[in-house]
Amino acid sequence: MKKIILQFSLILLAASPLMAQKAEGKKNIENLCGCFEVTFKYAETFSPDEEYEYKNREVINGGIELVIPIQITENKVVMQHLLVVNDKVIVKHWREDWTWENPVIWQYDRDLVWNKKTLPASAVKGKCTQTVWEVSDAPRYQGSSEWVHTDGKTFWMNTTDAPLPRREYKKRSDYNVLQRTNRIYVDSTGWLHEQDNKKILKTTAGTKLIAEEKGINDYRRVEMSKCAAGKKYWDQYQAYWEKVRLVWDEYMATHTSVQLVQELEGKPLHEHLYALGKEYVEGTVKAGELNGRINASITKYFKDALAATTK
């Protein structure tokens, strides 16, 4: 009996630091939510090619961004970003999911192809996985790491492959993978997303480094009243975007690979979904038609579905 009690006590002692780590990570993640004034800075810093022409440095005033926690459970926090242009113009921006000890990773290959990979429990023990989704709720990138507090700083860091950023996918064809080293720092006035990126051309023959880049995305907390229009937008549109997420969830739960096309007839997927969402809110789409319309809009951007229709 004493032996059983001792073993149970040892299990509790081992679990306690992990439980504290989980609670602290969740607190840090929830602190990413709120109303923020945002600026984005990017600059290419290095290329192995002596004749490479560096692109212009970019400083972008991102305006006001509302980050809403739309789902909070014991092991998961889902946050929706909304760009508040003004009281009349709100843009449904990117989404991020944070999950505790998540073993399933959608690993980006190249040219809008992601492959499902299951990691051993030991590889994700004590780690939080950040999953970033496109404005259309299509996949973007994932990475796992621990939240760390050291030298007076609290941060999370991971390196993972991703598609070209939206600011470049129409401008660049010399690379097809952005290898991102993401650092997220949380402090009392907001948070900072620091990036050390490698722009890589990946082919069947191997990989080639085109250029390296530094990125700083700075989120400074402001009064929630500045995001009132974003909150109103989400009250109107959240049911619609929940249905969009369910279509993605179902597809990714039943496939081991996702392959997308960037545009069809000159339009990216998000333009179709934005327009359909507006129709839904204005009442011009019948409730019974909505799921089918969403599914049809998304499905046609899958490479396998597109190939089937062109045979």
Image (cartoon, rainbow, N blue to C red):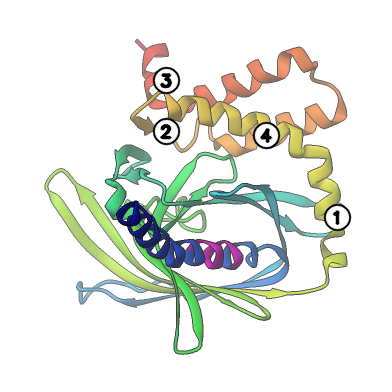
Q: Which residue is mark 2?
A: 260
Of circles 2 and 4, the one toward us is 4
Proximity of marks 2 and 1: CB atoms separated by less than 8 Å: no
Task: Give whichever of discs 1 and 4 has the lower sequence position.
Answer: 1
Query: At x 43% / y 33%, what residue is drawn?
Result: 261
Proximity of marks 1 and 3: CB atoms separated by less than 8 Å: no
User: Crowdedness of circle 2 by 10 Å Cα count: few (<14), some, many (20+)?
Assistant: many
Of circles 4 and 3, the one toward us is 4
User: Crowdedness of circle 4 by 10 Å Cα count: few (<14), some, many (20+)?
Assistant: few
Q: Which residue is mark 1?
A: 229
Task: Give whichever of discs 3 and 2 has the lower sequence position.
Answer: 2
Looking at the rendered structure, the kind of residue marked 1 is Ala
Q: Position of residue 113 (x, y in %)?
A: 34, 38
Task: Give whichever of discs 2 and 1 has the lower sequence position.
Answer: 1
Q: Which residue is mark 3?
A: 306
Real-space Cα separation, disc 3 to disc 2, in angstroms = 9 Å
Q: Tell me where the magenta segment starts and ends, as one range.
A: 22-27
Front-most of residues 203 and 161: 161
Looking at the rendered structure, the kind of residue marked 4 is Glu
Asked if residue 173 lies in the magenta stretch, the reply is no
Looking at the rendered structure, the kind of residue marked 3 is Leu
Real-space Cα separation, disc 2 to disc 1, in angstroms = 33 Å
Real-space Cα separation, disc 2 to disc 4, in angstroms = 21 Å
Tag 2's secondary structure?
A: loop
Looking at the rendered structure, the kind of residue marked 2 is Leu
Q: Which residue is mark 4?
A: 242
Could you tell me what secondary structure mostly forms the magenta stretch? helix
Which quadrant of the figure has residue 288? top right
Residue 177 shows in the view: no
